[in-house]
Image (tube, helix red, strand yellow):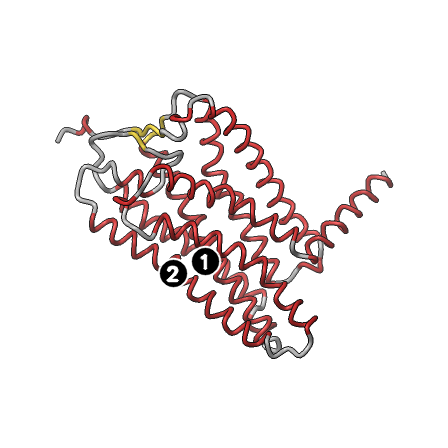
Amino acid sequence: MANSSFVTEFLLLGFSSLGELQLVLFVAFLSLYLIILSGNITIISVIHLDRSLHTPMYFFLGVLSTSEIFYTIVILPKMLINLLSVLRTLSFMSCATQMFFFLGFAVTNCLLLGVMGYDRYAAICQPLHYPILMSWRVCGQLAATCVVSGFLISLVGTTLVFSLPFCGSNKVNHYFCDISPVIRLACAETYINELVIFICGVLVLVVPLLFICISYGFIVHTIMKIPSAEGKRKAFSTCASHLIVVIVHYGCASFVYLRPSAKYTTGKDRLVTVTYTIITPLLNPMVYSLRNKDVQLAIRKVIGKTGFSSKTL
């Protein structure tokens, strides 16, 4: 087959079938994007400025918020441009790069949520050993492991997709270069590649989720031994925010990635993808700021200090 017949760029169809509704989507997604950025930047800033939040739990929340910001930057700006543009092409290399960084930050988020589950287990079930189990050195090593592992797995997945020949249609029926809609365009047998990608998906999604479930099994068992109702309520409240984010994140990601690309259905999958590329990063700061009294108090303190400084000047 001649090299000239190979695909050199992809056309992202995105929401082009919706016609004039794309302008409404642009306004809605732009608003959500700005809220995601401002919300996660607020979380990071408050954790950095308030010494009472300098704990392992909030350290990992800060790392997660940082990852969420880059996760959305990889996808949303290009999607917003495409909603207003007729030319929705992306070069072969740009598509591969987008997939690599998207998967890298997505896998990092999954692993971080697993580590945050372990942190809650150590804090509630092993309180006397907690300073040793979750020392700053250990926290740094765990965070670095999540990031490095995330991008190594992403490299494997992206290589498996883009090592295939693309010599037919270049129309990606999605708003970004995701695995299923891209690999379907390959003009070669994809079974082995998809099988390896599926195994990676199981390792990334099922193993951490199973670990989280086991951790929360021990947590619930320990909390039920607390004699006071107030003590139980306080212990449960520290886990509620994490659980909400875990359910939405793992639920949507599992629906899309733990099945063959042949079962990819454009409308339903695109809706679910919008949930985990936009709603989940939005949910993270909202859940942790609205449900977490420590973060709420820290935000008030930071705002109070800022207001006092402004008045002094």
Secondary structure at numbered mark 1: helix
Q: Real-space Cα distance between discs 1 and 2? A: 11 Å
- State the residue at coordinates (65%, 51%): 289
In the rendered view, tell whether residue 97 sits above or below residue 26.
below
Please give the name of the residue rendered at 47% of the width and 26% of the height, measured from the top-left corner.
81
Q: Is residue 141 left or right of residue 257?
A: right
**Residue bearing mark 2:** 206
The amino acid pointed to by label 2 is Val
Q: Can you say whether 173 is above or below 237 in the image? A: above
Foreground mark, 1 or 2, reads 2
Dot 1 surroundings within 10 Å: few (below 14), some, or many (20 or more)? many
Label 2 secondary element: helix
> Where residue 211 appears, x then y in whole percent?
44, 66
Numbered circle sitting on residue 256? none
Say which of 262 and 125 sits in front.
262
Q: Position of residue 73 (x, y in %)?
A: 50, 38
**Which image quarter holds the C terminus?**
top right
Badge 2: residue crowd in 10 Å (few <14, some 14–19, many ≥20) = some
> In the rendered image, which residue does mark 1 sit on?
111
